[in-house]
Image (spheres, rainbow, N blue to C red):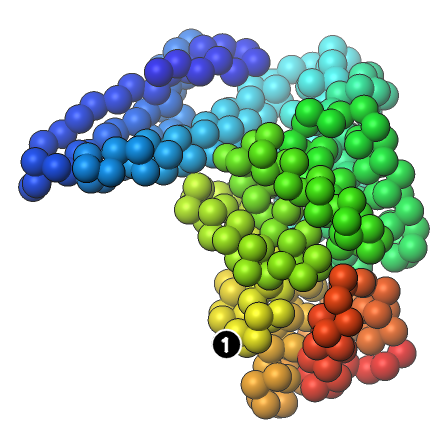
Amino acid sequence: MCSRSAASWACATWSRAACASPATVRIVAQLIETENGTHIWADRFDGDLRDIFTLQDAITERIVAAVEFNVQAAEIKRTRAKPTDSLTAYDFYLRALPAYFGQTVADYKGAALVLGHALEQDPEYSEALGLLIDTVAVRTMLGWHESWSGGVDEACRLAERAVAGAQDNSTCLASAAFTFGVLSRRFDEAFDLANRAVLLHPNSVLVRYRTAAVYTVCGEPDKAIVQCEAAVRMNPLASRKAATATFSTLSSALYFTGRFEDCLDAGRRALALAPQDNVSRKYVAMALGQLGRTRDARIEIAELVKRQTDASIALFKQQGFRHKWMHELHLEGLRKAGLREE
């Protein structure tokens, strides 16, 4: 099976090996850069031939997700060798990816700047627009934007632009859904966009974890958990940022199902990857508060306030949820964790 990247051909080769049972099959897949023979990706899949369609779907999910991420990484490496004065919109997009996949304030600012340059070159470049929306929205959620209201307004303007002109791009739809649902309480619109994004690109890890966040705030945490589990299953070796976002979102979804121990576990997995992830730390503190582990909750709250100096119940009240019970459970957790009111 062959796939073509923007710059060159790469191929995946398949082989079948004998296994212990006649009904068991092992499939080995490889992705090779044909210009220089560089090995980009490989994996193996074991399954039962008696359920061949389920096996086929599982393999397709894994390969599509892996190829998407690994070809991007190969293209980033390639484009870094190009002279700055000959960059096109696509070059700007690729140059933004290392910062986009970073998880610091500087990374988010840098990614937004370069993605903006890409859109100056081509205002209709939907993939660059989708990542820019995501960058601004997440920067706001993490408390790294100059102001909450300013970040929400900026992300919404970009999201509305995407919905108007990029309705066939799953990154744009998922990022717009995240912005409308998580930041601006436009729940019905966000839910519809999230559903469309999954239909367009069910094998995108980004689509899965961003739509999961939308389902959570829209009062469908069980549905969100399914999306997070799919993201992990499709690409267990995902980038650090993708894994952080997946476990952070999973933590919030588990919180609203009342599974506080599981919420704590998922949140800590996110923090192990990115200690600066303020959203995960908030849910870890809330879960500890709900579990009656007051001392541990206070420690997490102190660390949260240290990293996000304006963190308070008044600030987090600006984040909305579709249902009153969700809003109340959110505030209850914050208060039990010991977060200041103002």
Quadrant of the drawing holding the N terminus: top left
- Give the x, y percent position of residue 191: 71, 47
Badge count: 1
Residue at image coords 80%, 31%: 162
Q: Nearer the viewer, residue 45 or 186?
A: 186
Q: Quarter of the image holding residue 160?
A: top right
Residue 80 shown left or right of residue 20 in the figure: right
Residue 198 position by quadrant: top right
Quarter holding the C terminus is bottom right
Q: Residue at the spot x=68%, y=52% of the render?
A: 214
What is the x, y in percent for residue 29? Answer: 30, 27
User: On screen, 100 above or below 40?
Assistant: below
**Rendered view: 315 above or below 189:** below
* 341 horizontally vs 330: left or right: right
**Residue carrying label 1:** 261
Q: Does residue 291 lie above or below 123 as drawn?
A: below
Residue 194 seen in render = yes
| Three-letter amino acid code at the position of disc 1 | Glu
Q: Is residue 139 visible?
A: no
x and y percentages locating residue 150 in the rendered image: 92, 51
Q: Residue at x 77, y 49 (%)?
A: 188
Numbered disc 1: secondary structure: helix
User: Which of 129/34 is in front?
Assistant: 129
Q: Dot 1: few (<14), some (14–19), or many (≥20) neighbours within 10 Å?
A: some
Residue 4 location in percent, x, y?
Answer: 48, 13
Q: Residue at x 42, y 35 (%)?
A: 61
Q: Is 171 placed above or below 89 here?
A: below
